[in-house]
Image (spheres, rainbow, N blue to C red):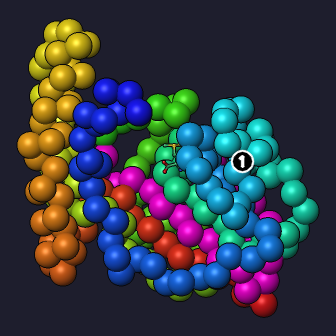
Amino acid sequence: MSLRRALEPPQPYLLNPAENIGAPLGRWNLYIGGAGCVVDGYVNLDLFAAPGVDVRADAHHLPFGDGVFQRVECDAVLEHVVDPERVMREIERVLAPGGYAHVVTPFCHPFHEYPRDFRRFTIDGLELMAGGMEVVAKGWRTGPAATLLVVVLEFVKMLLPWKWWRTVSHGVLGWVLFPLRYLDLWLWRSAYAGRIGNHCYLWLRKRG
Ligand SMILES: C[S@@+](CC[C@H](N)C(=O)[O-])C[C@H]1O[C@@H](n2cnc3c(N)ncnc32)[C@H](O)[C@@H]1O
């Protein structure tokens, strides 16, 4: 393991444990936008070829027949596509009847281009794109403490003139601040958590 990787601070967010609804994987499952991720059990599709990517394609035009997949995962991708409504219709089309889609999008989160960054979503906005799919569960995947930490990290880096200063400050601040991420375990109980929530999610089920 490289020294840089060993010193990399923990992620500034916790995943909401309430989010797991235990939707089973089927024989075929699709992970959209998984470049750089290990996604065992899924066909990994991304706009760009990279290690781990099985299919290079645009999510606006999924190169699969109707009703093929039991599970579709679309985590932090819709903010990067030109037409998220169209991508949601493609997800609905390739899902098997009774299959589940898990869609995650940022709400309060810094600008990040993969390869572009077009928009942010609320839970209500995501629900508007459910189409014919049933909303089984919805909520916050990463909460207000995650928002606070990523904004502080970005704010400090913005003030620093040299890249190596930014790299060092990311490491130091990341280690100093990460314990604050556990505040989300408590903040998720608040009705106000969504005002500055970090990423929201929907679990959708295709009827049939
Ligand atoms: C922010 S990354 C998310 C990676 C991973 N899902 C995660 O949560 O760590 C967004 C990914 O979506 C991919 N992507 C962007 N636009 C896409 C499109 N139109 N079709 C397929 N993949 C796309 C990018 O190449 C990138 O790998």
Label 1 CB sits under 8 Å from any ligand 1 atom: yes
Q: Examine the rendered structure and indicate whether residue 110 appears above or below residue 208.
A: above
Q: Please, which residue is most extreme toward the right here?
A: 65
On the rendered structure, is 97 left or right of 144? right
Q: What segment carries the magenta color?
A: 82-109
Q: Classify residue 138 by image quadrant.
A: bottom left
Q: Classify residue 82 by image quadrant.
A: top right
Q: Please, which residue is most extreme toward the top here?
A: 162
For the question of whether residue 128 can be seen, the reply is: no
- Which image quadrant: the N terminus? top left
Pinpoint residue 144: horizontal percent, then vertical percent: 19, 60
Question: Which residue is pictured at 12% across the width and 20% down the height?
Answer: 159
Question: Which residue is pictured at 20% across the width and 9% down the height?
Answer: 162
Q: Examine the rendered structure and indicate whether residue 162 appears above or below residue 154.
A: above
For the question of whether residue 193 can be seen, the reply is: yes
Residue bearing mark 1: 45
Pinpoint residue 57: horizontal percent, then vertical percent: 77, 41
Pinpoint residue 192: horizontal percent, then vertical percent: 16, 72
Q: Amino acid at mark 1?
A: Leu
Where is ligand 1, by quadrant? top right
On the rendered structure, is 164 left or right of 3? left
Q: Secondary structure at mark 1?
A: strand
Question: Which residue is pictured at 54% across the width and 64% down the height?
Answer: 103
On the rendered structure, is 117 left or right of 177? right
Please check the rendered image and state whether residue 183 is part of the magenta-colored stretch, yes or no: no
Which of the two residues, 86 or 19, is positioned nearer the viewer here?
A: 19
